[in-house]
């Protein structure tokens, strides 16, 4: 017989460890929220970039030419997810992950170059 939601021993130990260190996880979440707001504001200040509201660890942005921007970012070693072509409402949209302050600085510099 098996439980409906079978959880491995390793998963259970990892969950217990996370719960014992909840303060660390909450601090990390607060950092991500603060960086998300800072990154959204700085991306929005770039010409030709629309930033959609987000409560996740990523931002959806619309640029003039997502394919060209994505290729330019890749040449600089910055990977984003292009949604261009996935759906008409997602035309020229890229998803950028909110990272650590240094990672976000690299993204912003690369985005300035790419645009």
Image (cartoon, rainbow, N blue to C red):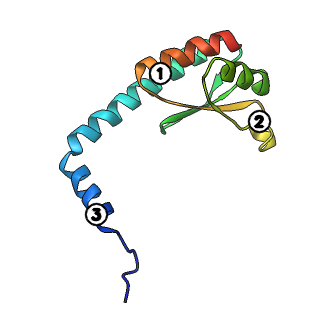
On the image, numbered disc 3 is attached to which residue?
12
Judge from the rendering whether residue 24 lies leftward or rightward of residue 52; answer left or right.
left
Direction bottom: furthest residue? 1
**Label 1, label 2: how far apart the Cα atoms are:** 23 Å
> What number of labels is visible?
3
On the image, numbered disc 1 is attached to which residue?
103
Residue 61 location, quadrant: top right
Horizontal and vertical percent position of residue 46: 63, 12
Task: Name the residue located 40 percent from the left edge and 31 percent from the top edge.
Answer: 33
> Label 3's element?
helix
> Label 2's element?
loop
Give yes or no for contact between labels 1 and 3 (Cβ–Cβ under 8 Å). no
On the image, numbered disc 2 is attached to which residue?
84
> Label 1's element?
helix
Does residue 40 lie above or below 91 as drawn? above
**Quadrant in the picture for the N terminus:** bottom left
Out of 100 and 33, give the one closest to the viewer.
100
Direction left: furthest residue? 20
Judge from the rendering whether residue 108 lies leftward or rightward of residue 62; answer left or right.
left
**Label 2, label 3: how far apart the Cα atoms are:** 39 Å
- The crowding category of the residue bearing disc 2, from other C-alpha atoms within 10 Å (few below 14, some 14 to 19, many at least 20), is some
Does residue 17 lie above or below 43 as drawn? below
Task: Name the residue located 49 percent from the left edge and 39 percent from the top edge.
Answer: 56
Horizontal and vertical percent position of residue 15: 28, 57
Mark 2 or mark 3, whichever is nearer to me = 3
Judge from the rendering whether residue 98 lies leftward or rightward of residue 61; answer left or right.
left
- The crowding category of the residue bearing disc 1, from other C-alpha atoms within 10 Å (few below 14, some 14 to 19, many at least 20), is few
Out of 55 and 16, give the one closest to the viewer.
16
**Label 1, label 3: how far apart the Cα atoms are:** 32 Å
């Amino acid at each position: 017989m098996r439980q409906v939601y079978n959880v491995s021993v390793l998963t259970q130990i990892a969950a217990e460890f996370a719960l014992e260190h909840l303060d660390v996880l909450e601090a990390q979440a607060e950092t991500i929220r603060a960086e998300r707001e800072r990154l959204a504001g700085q991306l929005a200040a770039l010409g030709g970039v629309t930033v959609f509201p987000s409560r996740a660890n990523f931002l959806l942005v619309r640029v003039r030419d997502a394919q060209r921007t994505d290729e330019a970012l890749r040449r600089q070693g910055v990977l984003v997810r292009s949604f261009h072509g996935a759906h008409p409402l997602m035309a020229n949209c890229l998803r950028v992950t909110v990272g650590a302050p240094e990672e976000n600085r690299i993204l912003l510099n690369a985005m300035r170059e790419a645009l």
